[in-house]
Amino acid sequence: MLDWSTCPAVEQDPAKVSGAWVFRGSRVPVSALFENLEGGATLDQFLAWFPGVARAQAEAVLEHAARSVQAA
């Protein structure tokens, strides 16, 4: 399980999406990015489907995940 608390692109609020980690300022769960990429979508497609997520946020989430995997 990744520690999202150190990623500035995301936030967790019990009042939003049942407390799931979401992209800051949105209700889009971080998990939606990974589910779409695993399903074959491109980053550009994801961003088009979820306009509340900025490219910089999505890239920060991917970089955070990559760093976390390398550290493990």
Image (cartoon, rainbow, N blue to C red):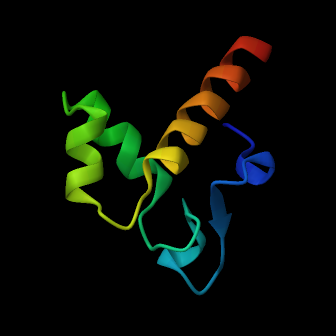
Q: Quadrant of the C terminus?
A: top right
Q: Horizontal and vertical percent for residue 24?
A: 59, 66
- Give the residue drawn at x 44%, y 73%: 27
- Asked whether residue 52 appears in the rendered view, the answer is yes
- Give the residue drawn at x 66%, y 68%: 12
Viewed as shown, does residue 32 lie left or right of 56? left
Image: 17 above or below 58: below
Q: Horizontal and vertical percent for residue 53?
A: 41, 59
- Give the residue drawn at x 31%, y 36%: 43
Instruction: Please count the marks in the image.
Output: 0
Q: Horizontal and vertical percent for residue 35?
A: 32, 40
Q: Horizontal and vertical percent for residue 57?
A: 54, 50
- Asked whether residue 72 appears in the rendered view, the answer is no
- Quarter of the rendering containing residue 67: top right
- Quarter of the rendering containing residue 2: top right
Viewed as shown, does residue 50 lie left or right of 21? left
